[in-house]
Image (cartoon, rainbow, N blue to C red):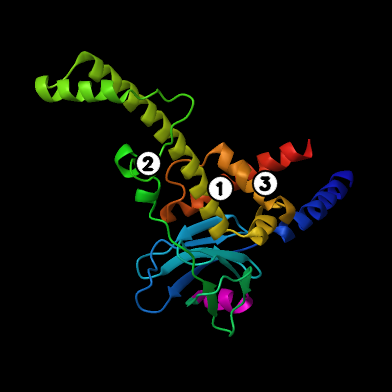
Amino acid sequence: MRKFYLSVCFLFLLAPVAAQQITRVMVQGQLTAPPGEDLEGISVYNRSSQKGTISEIDGSFQLEMAANDRVLITALQFQSFTVIIDEGVIENKSLKIYLNPNLNQLEEVIVRPYDLTGNVEVDVGRVKVYDFDTALSFDYQSMEFEYDFKDDAQSRIRNVVSEEVSNLNVMQYGFTPLGILEFIGKDRKKRRQTKALSAIQSEEIVATVLRQRYNVYFFEDSYSIPQTRYDDFIYFVQEQGIPEGYLKPENEIRLLGFLKQQSTLYLERTED
């Protein structure tokens, strides 16, 4: 009798756990936009299940969803927005999203399907697109004419007469030992200055891209970052350093996972 009683109690304890399990179905998604808009590589991330995918060249994608799930759509050229999944999407296993580019930068966009077949139309703010292949390239050639390094306390005092003589010797004999050493010293100094400027500009680009893609509502809703700490968290991520390539559209899922890890670390440090 006691064994039977214990078995019944055990089943009752398991019942709430089973009830909390959410069954998700594979939904066929389709992104559409006006002609000329790029639909490939758009990130589709289910915040509720913490799983995501990216769209194909024709805008199609597949992702498991359940009713009331929040699905984040992130495109490099558009403002991010969230779709709340309803029963119509689950029953039809279909989600069609029409992107209507809007020149105005909007606040957080949360939309629902407007009919029972899973159709969504959303006005999305257009954002400035960075070419990461060039924007994150800080080689000597690309920067030597973009910044004028002024003379400072570390700069040598120019001797015009000596320089004229050195130049004359170079013209007559091709080179001088003093001239070679002088050139090497100047080149090393400029390379150090260029490298320092590269790091500063790289950090600025990271902060700008994060702000364009994710607003205060996203970080608060997804990672529990208070709105008042939005800028501080971005600076924190910037200082930690984002892995190379994570800012590219095809690595959106990896970037979101990285931000999740950083948010946990940030909240632990700020609570101490």
**Vertical side of 165 occupied by 93: above or below:** below
Q: Secondary structure at mark 1?
A: helix
Tag in front: 2 or 1: 2
- Residue 232's label in the rendered image is 3
Please tell me which of labels 3 and 2 falls first in the chain.
Answer: 2
Residue 61 in which image quadrant? bottom left
Q: Secondary structure at mark 3?
A: helix
Image location (x, y in percent) of residue 259 = 58, 47
Q: Is residue 32 magenta?
A: no
**Vertical side of 239 occupied by 177: above or below:** above
The foreground one among 236 and 84 is 236
Residue 129 in which image quadrant? bottom left
Residue 12 in which image quadrant? bottom right
User: Farthest residue toward the bottom?
Assistant: 115
Q: Where does the magenta region start and end?
A: 84-96
Tell me which residue sits at (53%, 53%) in the image: 208
| Mark 2 vs 1: CB contact within 8 A | no
Q: Which residue is mark 2?
A: 138
